[in-house]
Amino acid sequence: MRELKKGYLEFKKSFKEYQELFKELIEKGQHPKSFFITCSDSRIVPHLITNSKPGDLFVSRNIGNFVPPFSKEAEFSSAASALEYAVEVLNVENIIVCSHSDCGAIASLFKDIKPSISNINIRKWLSLGEEVKEKTIKDMPKAPLDEKKEYAQKISAIFQIKNLLTYPFVEERVKKNTLKLYAWYYNIEEGEILVYSFKDKRYIPLEEFDE
Ligand SMILES: [Zn+2]
C-alpha cells in the first residue's frame, strides 16, 4: 500500500497535464472506439502497449482473457455485461481479444488442479478453456509442454472471437460491418504484438496487418 500511496502522490503532481483531457472526457462523455479484452495478468498494460490515452480503450479483464459463450442464464457475468455495454451503449468499432505469452491461466489448463473450497470459481472459469486445451492436444499430441502452451495461448484468442460471435448483437454488427473483431497475441518478453489474419489463417506482426 505504501508503494501505491507514493505512486499516487507522483500522479497528483503530474495530474495538471491530464486535467484538460479529463475535463473534456467528462463534458463530452467517453467515446472509446475499441473494447479491449485481455488477461488480468499484471504484466499486460493495455494503454502502454498501444500508446493509448485515457478515454481511448474500454477494458475488460479476466484470468485467461476468456469470453463466455452467450447465455440468457449467465449469473452475474462481468465479462458479458462489459461486452453488452461496450457494443450496445458505447458503440465501439473494434473488439480486441488480447492473449499473451507466459499466461498462467493457459498453463493451468495443462495442470491437474485438485478441487477445493478456495478454487471453485477458478476451476469453473478455466473450463472455458477446455476446447482450447483439447484442440492443442489433438493438433500437437507429442509437442513439449512449452510449445503446447504457446500454441494454446495463440489459438485461445481465436476461440474467444468465435464465442463473441455467439452474442446476437455482436454477430449482427459484424455482418453489417459496423464492428470488427481481432485476435491479438502479445509477447511480454519481446514487447511484440501479433494479430491473427483470418484471410491468411495465421498470426502476423501487427505492423504488417492491413485487413
Ligand atoms: Zn494470462
Image: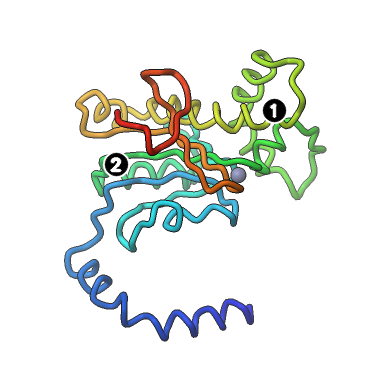
From the viewer's side, name the closer residue of 54 and 197: 197
Q: Position of residue 76 (x, y in %)?
A: 49, 46
> Quadrant of the image for the N terminus?
bottom right
**Residue positioned 32% across, 82% down in the render:** 16
Q: Dot 2 lies on which element?
A: helix
Q: Position of residue 26 (x, y in %)?
A: 23, 69
- Give the quarter the ligand 1 occupies: top right
Q: Is residue 53 visible?
A: yes
Q: CA distance from mark 2 to mark 1?
A: 35 Å
**Mark before the other along the chain sequence, 2 or 1:** 2
Q: Tell me: residue 119, above or below residue 194.
A: below
**Mark 1 Cβ and ligand 1 under 8 Å apart:** no
**In the rendering, which numbered label is found on residue 87?**
2
Task: Answer with left or right where residue 161 lies relative to residue 84.
Answer: right
Task: Answer with left or right where residue 29 lies relative to residue 124.
Answer: left
**Residue positioned 45% across, 38% down in the render:** 97
Category of crowding for the residue at label 1, using alpha-carbon neighbours closer than 10 angstroms: few (below 14), some (14–19), many (at least 20): few
**Residue positioned 44% across, 34% down in the render:** 205
Name the amino acid type tagged 2: Val
Q: Dot 1 lies on which element?
A: helix
> Quadrant of the image for the C terminus?
top left
> Viewer-nearest of labels 2 and 1?
1
Q: Position of residue 173 (x, y in %)?
A: 24, 30
The image quarter in which residue 83 lies:
top left
Q: Position of residue 85 (x, y in %)?
A: 32, 47
The image quarter in which residue 199 lies:
top left
Task: Answer with left or right where residue 164 lies relative to residue 89.
Answer: right
Q: Tell me: residue 125, above or below residue 51.
A: above
From the viewer's side, name the closer residue of 131 and 97: 97
Residue assigned mark 1? 147
Name the amino acid type tagged 1: Glu
Q: Is residue 70 visible?
A: no
